[in-house]
Amino acid sequence: MQGERPERDQRAAGSEDIDVLIVGAGFAGLYMLYKLRELGFRAQVVEAGSDVGGTWYWNRYPGARCDIPSIEYSYSFSPELERDWRWTERYAAQPEILAYLGHVADRFDLRRDIRFDTRVMAADWDDAAGHWAVTLDDGSTQPTPHLILATGALSAPKTPDLAGLDKFRGDILHTALWRDDVAIDGKRVAVFGTGSSGIQAIPQLAARAAQLTVFQRTPNFAVPAGNHPLTDEDRATAARTLRADREAARHSPLGFFSAPRPGAAKAQDPAARTQRFEEQWGAGTAGMLLAYEDLLFDEESNGFAAQFIRDKIAGIVADPDKRRAITPTGYPLGSRRMCSEIGFYDAMARDDVTLVDVRENPVIDMTADSIVTQSGGYPADVIVFATGFDACVGAIKSIDIRGRAGLSLRDDWDNGPRAYLGLAIAGFPNLFTITGPGSPSVLSNVVISIEQHVDWIAQCLAALRARGGAIIEAEADAEQAWMAHTDEVAQQTLFPRADSWYKGRTRDGREVFMPYVGGVGTYRVRCDEVAAAGYAGFSIRERTSI
C-alpha cells in the first residue's frame, strides 16, 4: 500500500548481479528485455502477474479487445515474428493478444529472465554506490545500476469512492481485475462507467444478466469497430506493404498506418462532407478523426463530425431519455478518448437495460443488495466498476521511489506529473520511464511509441557503458522546458477543452496535460536530436567521480 515501505533486510533470494532491472512484462517490458539482451546487458524483469501480458494479463473482462487493428498493434522489430504469427481478427480480443505476447516470450526465451508473482514496493537511489536498491514485496532487495519502469500508462485501476459501498454484500468487480468465478448469468448487474472498457463490456453483460443498470457520469463518443475475421487474402495484402506501412507510421502524427485525409470539414459542401463521414464511420476507432486533417484543431469542423455521430446515436436509441443521457455534448469529438463499440448502442436500447445519469441523479448510499440514488434504489447482485485507471502515472506512483537526497517521486508528482521527453525525471538518476508523461503514449499507437522508447533507452545505455558506466540524469531546466512545450502544443488543439484523464492535477488544482500531442514523428525527431547532441538536456557524470 502507498506509504508502506517493507524493511530492506536481505538481498532478493536467488538474485544475481544485473545491469538493468525492468518493472513490468507487458509489451514494453518484453521488448526492453529482448533489446538489452541483444546488446549484451544482464537484465531482469519483475512482474506482479503470474505470466507475461501486462495490461492484457489483467484485463480479462467480457468484450475486452484492442481498438487498434491487430496488425498495427504488434511488434515490428522482428520480420520472423511477423511472418509466424497469424492474427485472426481485425481487432484482436484479449485472449488472442495475451497468446501473442506469450508466443513472443517463448519464441525469444524471455521467461528465464522474468520473476513472476513479484511486486516492486520501493526503490531507493544510493548516490555513493551509484545504483538503485529495489525493494520487493517479500522484503528483499535487488540492487541495480539502472531501473526501467515499463509499468504501462493504463495499468493502475481506479475505483470511485462511493458512499455506503462497504454495506454492499454482493460481488464487486473491476474490469481491470476481472474474476471469472463471479456468476453473471441471470443476475442483477450494475455497471459504473461508459468509457472504453464499459462500452466493450456492457453488450456482453446485457446479454447475460437478468437486468443491467448502467451508472454513467459522462457519455463518450463511440464508433463502430468494424471488426471482422482476417482472411488469408487480408493477411497477404497487409504483408505486401507492411514494411513501408510500419516506417510511415513511425513518422506519422498518431503512429497509425492510415493518415488524416486532407481538407477542412467546414470548407466542404454538406453533401460531400456527409459522404466522407459515412465512409469513415466504419473505419475503426480513429476513422472519424482521420476524416479531415483539421478535426482536432478547428472547433467548427469538429462540430460537424460530432453532430454526425450524435445523429447516428439517435437512429439507434429510440427512448428519448436514454438517448439524451447517452449522447455526448459539451466537449469536442476526440478530446476524450475515442471508443469503438460492438453492439453498445443496441444494448443500451434494450428494455432490460436501465441508464442512470449520476450527475443528475447521484448515488447517495448503498444497501446489502441495492444502489441508492437521490431518486430511489436500484437492486444489484453484482457491481462492475468500469471506471478506468489512474492514467499515465498511477502505476509509477504506486512504487515508493526515492531519488537523490531522498526525493520522493510521489510527492514531487503531486505538484504535476513531469518527465523530460517522457523518458527521464530530474532528481532520479539512471531511471527511465517507457511512455511516461510528456511522450505521445496514450495518444498514439502505443506499440509504435514503446518500440521507439525502448530503442532510444537501449542506445543510451550502450553509450553510457562505452563511457565506463556513467550515470545519467535529466536536467531540471530541460524537463521544465519540455513539459511547458508539451502544454503549449496541447493548447493549440481541442484536447484541453474536455475534462479527461489525459490531464494530471497539481496540489493547488491546476491542470497538467500529460501526453505529447505534437505527433509521433515529430517526437521521434526530437529524441534523435537529443541523442545526437550527446544527450542534450541530460547531465552525465562518470561513476568514478562519485
Image (spheres, rainbow, N blue to C red):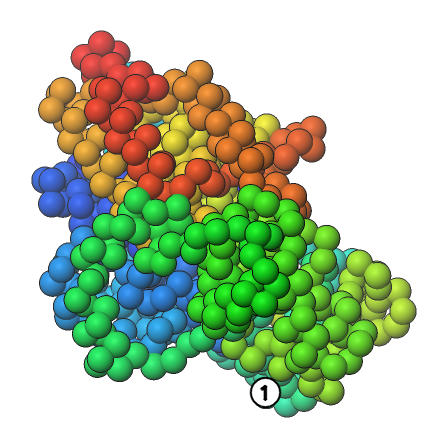
Q: Residue at x 78, y 62 (%)?
A: 358
Question: Is 360 left, or right, of 62 in this rendering?
Answer: right
Residue 508 higher or lower than 168, as above or below: above
Q: Position of residue 65 (x, y in %)?
A: 43, 70
Q: Nearer the viewer, residue 168 or 539?
A: 539
Residue type pointed to by label 1: Arg
Question: Is 38 left, or right, of 478 in this rendering?
Answer: left
Q: Residue at x 44, y 16 (%)?
A: 477
Classify 10 Å Cα crowding around label 1: few (below 14), some (14-19), many (20 and above): some
Quarter of the image with the C terminus in it: top left
Q: Would you say residue 60 is visible in this rendering?
A: no
Q: Position of residue 296 (x, y in %)?
A: 54, 48
Q: Would you say residue 473 is visible in this rendering?
A: yes
Q: Residue at x 80, y 58 (%)?
A: 359
Q: Nearer the viewer, residue 213 or 490?
A: 490
Q: Which residue is mark 1?
A: 208
Q: Residue furthest right?
A: 375
Residue 57 image-quadrant placement: bottom left
Q: Position of residue 203 (x, y in %)?
A: 58, 79
Q: Residue furthest front?
A: 269
